[in-house]
């Protein structure tokens, strides 16, 4: 998004409550104004246009959100395919390096470690370091025999 687009978006958000309050005040006091039918019609027209603008903004945000989610899914699939295409010995080395992080005191580090271990293994064994060590040990004979 351009700088001008961001300014427009910010201005739109700031003016929304002011426009709605102004329309409400004019609609409530329309009887004291000359041409009350015209004023009331103008208020309805302004509200209709504003609702359409808000709807358009909601649709734009939905499209952006769906696009971001789609890209994340594609990125995740690509990463999974890359991890699955690596030789088993490389996966086991990476898993061994990630095990200490799985026991970290930092929850975010543990979560990232677990995600990467699951990506390497093709299955999620949870936060249990011993379970991951057993998985690595079970893969060792396959790696030693030259399996991919």
Image (cartoon, helix red, strand yellow):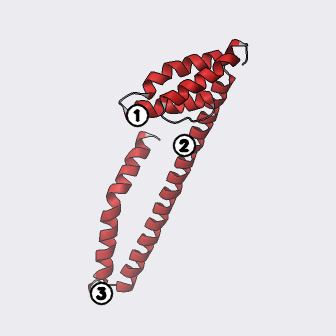
Mark 3 or 2, nearer chain start: 3
Q: State how far apart marks 1 and 3 are (Cα).
A: 61 Å
Q: Is residue 72 left or right of residue 109?
A: right
Q: Which residue is mark 2?
A: 68
State which quadrant residue 79 falls in: top right
Q: State how far apart marks 3 and 2 are (Cα).
A: 49 Å
Q: Is residue 118 left or right of residue 145?
A: left
Residue 11 location, x and y as percent? 35, 52
Tell me, yes or no, if residue 87 can be seen here: no
State which quadrant residue 47 falls in: bottom left
Circle 1 — which element?
helix
Q: Which residue is mark 1?
A: 108
* Quadrant (top left, top right, bottom left, bottom right) of the C terminus: top right
The dot on residue 116 is none
Residue drawn at point x = 46 percent, y = 67 percent: 51
Q: Which residue is mark 3?
A: 31
In this view, the mark in front (1 or 3): 1
Circle 3 — which element?
helix
Mark 1 or 2, nearer chain start: 2
Residue drawn at point x = 52 percent, y = 33 percent: 115
Residue 7 location, x and y as percent? 37, 46
Mark 1 or 3, nearer chain start: 3
Residue drawn at point x = 30 percent, y = 70 percent: 22
Circle 2 — which element?
helix
């Amino acid at each position: 998004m351009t700088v001008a687009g961001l300014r427009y978006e910010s201005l739109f958000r700031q003016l929304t409550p002011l426009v709605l309050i102004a329309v409400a005040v004019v609609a409530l006091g329309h009887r004291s104004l000359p041409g009350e039918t015209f004023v009331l019609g103008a208020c309805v027209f302004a509200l209709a246009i504003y609702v359409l603008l808000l709807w358009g903004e909601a649709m734009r945000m939905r499209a952006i959100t769906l696009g971001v989610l789609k890209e994340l899914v594609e990125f995740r699939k690509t990463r999974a395919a890359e991890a699955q295409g690596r030789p088993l010995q490389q996966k086991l080395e990476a898993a061994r390096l990630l095990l200490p992080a799985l026991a970290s005191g930092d929850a975010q580090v543990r979560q990232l470690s677990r995600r990467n271990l699951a990506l390497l293994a093709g299955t999620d064994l949870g936060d249990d370091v011993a379970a991951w060590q057993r998985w690595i040990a079970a893969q060792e004979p396959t790696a030693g025999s030259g399996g991919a």
